[in-house]
Amino acid sequence: MAREYLKKATLTAATGATDVHETVTQILADIEAGGDQAALDFAAKFDKYDGSILLSAEEIEAAYALVPEKLKADIRFAHDNVRRFAEAQKSTVADVEYEVVPGLIAGQKAIPVDAAGCYVPGGRYSHIASAIMTVTTAKVAGCRHITACSPPRPDVGVAPAIVYAAHICGADKIMAMGGVQGVAAMTFGLFGLPKANILVGPGNQFVAEAKRILFGRVGIDMIAGPTDSLILADATADAHIVATDLVSQAEHGYNSPVWLVTDNRPLAEKVMDLVPGLIDDLPEVNRENAAAAWRDYAEVIVCSDREEMAACSDDYAPEHLTVQAQDLEWWLDRLTCYGSLFLGEETTVSYGDKASGTNHVLPTSGAAGYTGGLSVHKYMKIVTWQRATREGSKPVAEATARISRLEGMEGHARAADVRLAKYFPDETFDLTANG
């Protein structure tokens, strides 16, 4: 049976995209030319904030006092989970030394980048979890300098909970600046900051475009689009939990796709009946986002069996993928394209978004087909090295000379020739391309 769409999206992420490229390009050029003052001018225009740009120790301490103790405990709990998982990830990358052929030793080293710039959204929602996810992983990776950058609110500054989270997670500097100007300040090393080697963290379309334009001059975690989530559910799934999970992700934004893929039509129909009521029960700002996302971007798909469900999911390559079905090990072995996987109703995307330990900065818009999300590895350069004895160098030099001449790269060949001539003056070698 072909996939049956009980609900089909009327819009896609590309449909509602606004061309912001020229605007962002001009802002970046102005700030690069104008330095600190240009960044301050844009901050005054867009952030409508004229307080401290780099928070002092006293300002950080004052923010601490504004965060309730229970929230501090929750932030520490989430930080500890993310830190321990990042440490486990880091342990999977080891320095290697290997004798490729006798006398020729090659190796790899994992070296953290020097300076990381972590963007933490602070507009409609205070993304406390984004501070935890980005700063903690940079710290565990071993970055020597970490800047956390977040949009300030007029006459208030950066949300105190974001300040608290960024500081306890290891940020060396906390910058009250948002949007393109914040990204530019970290990239260009304004306000006495070191120039960032990598920019990470989610943001609006202007932040995403700035990162895309700057990629190459600096590393980035990924080019992010609207967040998306897919649920795979069979007849054993709880329709109320499935519907609740879909709505919980639709509230991210008006253009955040959510998808249900199932082999059970009655379940699909029940979920579709439940979703509108769950959306209506949300607070107004959340309700508006979720209603628009469900109306314009959501899809409900009925498949013939679990294999077709898995194939459908891999085609979508969702950022977040939830399985609420029997035989979870089968799904874990079968599924191949997702940013982060949530197996069973006992866990949910919301856990990963906030506190369970895996990172919530993940590939969107189908990018999970070729990449994973933010991890400690994103901040690390895997570099290689080699050394050789003179005997170990001999067969490599011969092969290099002949291959180089076949390619027409005589200079490369002669770099091998001179070593053979020096190390083995009494030997004759056939180093021609036809040898």
Image: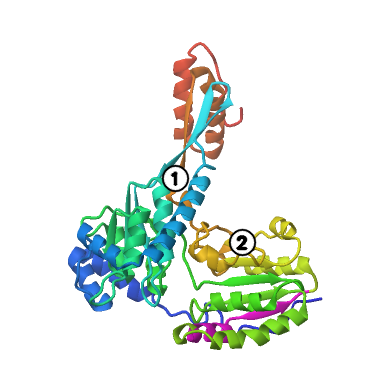
Q: Position of residue 429 (x, y in %)?
A: 56, 20
Q: Residue at x 49, y 71 (%)?
A: 225
Residue type indicated by callout 2: Leu
Instruction: Report whether 31 appears left or right of 128.
Output: left
Mark yes or no: residue 113 visible. yes
Label 1: few (<14), some (14–19) or many (≥20) C-alpha neighbours in 10 Å:
few
Residue behind mark 1:
381
Alpha carbon separation for disc pair 2 and 1: 26 Å
Report which quarter residue 79 is drawn in.
Answer: bottom left
**In the drawing, does residue 270 fall left or right of residue 295?**
right
Left or right relative to 297: residue 87:
left
What are the residue bounds of the magenta stretch? 287-303
Q: Amino acid at mark 1?
A: Lys
Disc 2: which residue: 341
- Figure label count: 2
Asked whether 280 or 397 is in front, the reply is 280
Provide residue 46's location: percent of width, then percent of height. Answer: 27, 77
Tell me the quadrant of the picture where the N terminus can be found.
bottom right
